[in-house]
Amino acid sequence: MDLKVAGSTPVTRPSFGFGRQFRAVMSRLLNSEAPQDESFGSSALWIGRERHANSAAKFWSSLLDEIVADYPVCDALRMEALTETALSRDLLFPETLLQKDMDVLEHGNFREAMHKAVEELNLYGLPGAVGIRLLSGDREILARELPMDCMDAELFPYMVVWLLEWAGVEPRQWNDETVKGRLAADDRRRQYTLDFALDSIHVSEGLYRRILSVEFSRETLAQP
């Protein structure tokens, strides 16, 4: 499955023991019938003095730009997904996880690995959807699932860990029942401020409901 967000370099992620690659391209996440807007999203975000050019930067900036443009009264969002993925810093570098998978295949039995991948697919099925709600104060203004060709429950943790990393939350806290953070990011044109809380509810062995609540603002920066 390919992640469709405003263009950035492809990112590879593991799936059922194999690498899957998603490429970020221009696509609206909340209103596919609206005309595309190439101004949505940034290829890189600055967090303090560090520049981050990755799909997470593109995803979060694109999502917030779309919300500001199409739902200007929105000041908060809530995203929810069921996932078995534990949050760790390994998810920040999916290419490393892919290499581990490739090493296993290179030194192992390909037929056996394929059989295991099919078994896991039959057992767990395809990734679930990511639900999103847009809020204006306490009033809900939109509730829907993100398009599966843009975001699913397997990709969601890869986007969430970057918020935790950017906010400076200690990795040992990432899987706590509730973890909160705040961050400011900019692309030299716009500044995004996010206050967020991530709730992790244990559903069954290895399965968690991740609920991400974000209050946000976006400001246009004065140009020199």
Image (tube, helix red, strand yellow):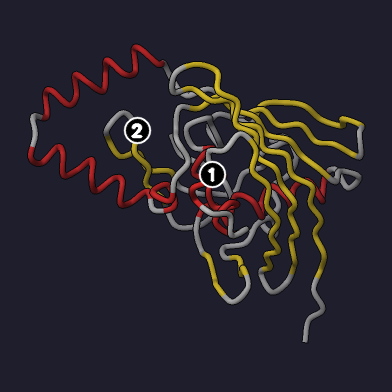
Return the residue nearer the eye: 1 or 48.
48
Q: Is residue 166 left or right of residue 223?
A: left
- Quick one: label 2, few (<14), some, or many (20+) residues within 10 Å? some
Residue 130, horizontal then vertical, whole percent: 61, 29
- State the residue at coordinates (81%, 68%): 220
> From this viewpoint, is residue 150 visible?
yes
Residue 104, horizontal then vertical, whole percent: 16, 39
Q: Is residue 53 left or right of residue 117?
A: right
Return the residue nearer the eye: 170 or 69.
170
- Mark 2 sits on what residue? 15
Residue 87, horizontal then vertical, whole percent: 48, 41
Mark number, residue 219: none
> From this viewpoint, is residue 129 visible?
no
Secondary structure at badge 1 equals loop
- State the residue at coordinates (81%, 43%): 76
Alpha carbon distance from label 2 to label 1:
21 Å
Reply above or below: 103 against 146: below
- Quick one: label 1, few (<14), some, or many (20+) residues within 10 Å? many
Q: Quadrant of the N terminus?
A: top left
- State the residue at coordinates (76%, 31%): 133
> From this viewpoint, which residue is outermost toward the bottom?
224
Secondary structure at badge 2 equals strand
- Mark 1 sits on what residue? 174
Q: Is residue 81 left or right of residue 221?
A: left
Q: Amino acid at mark 2?
A: Ser
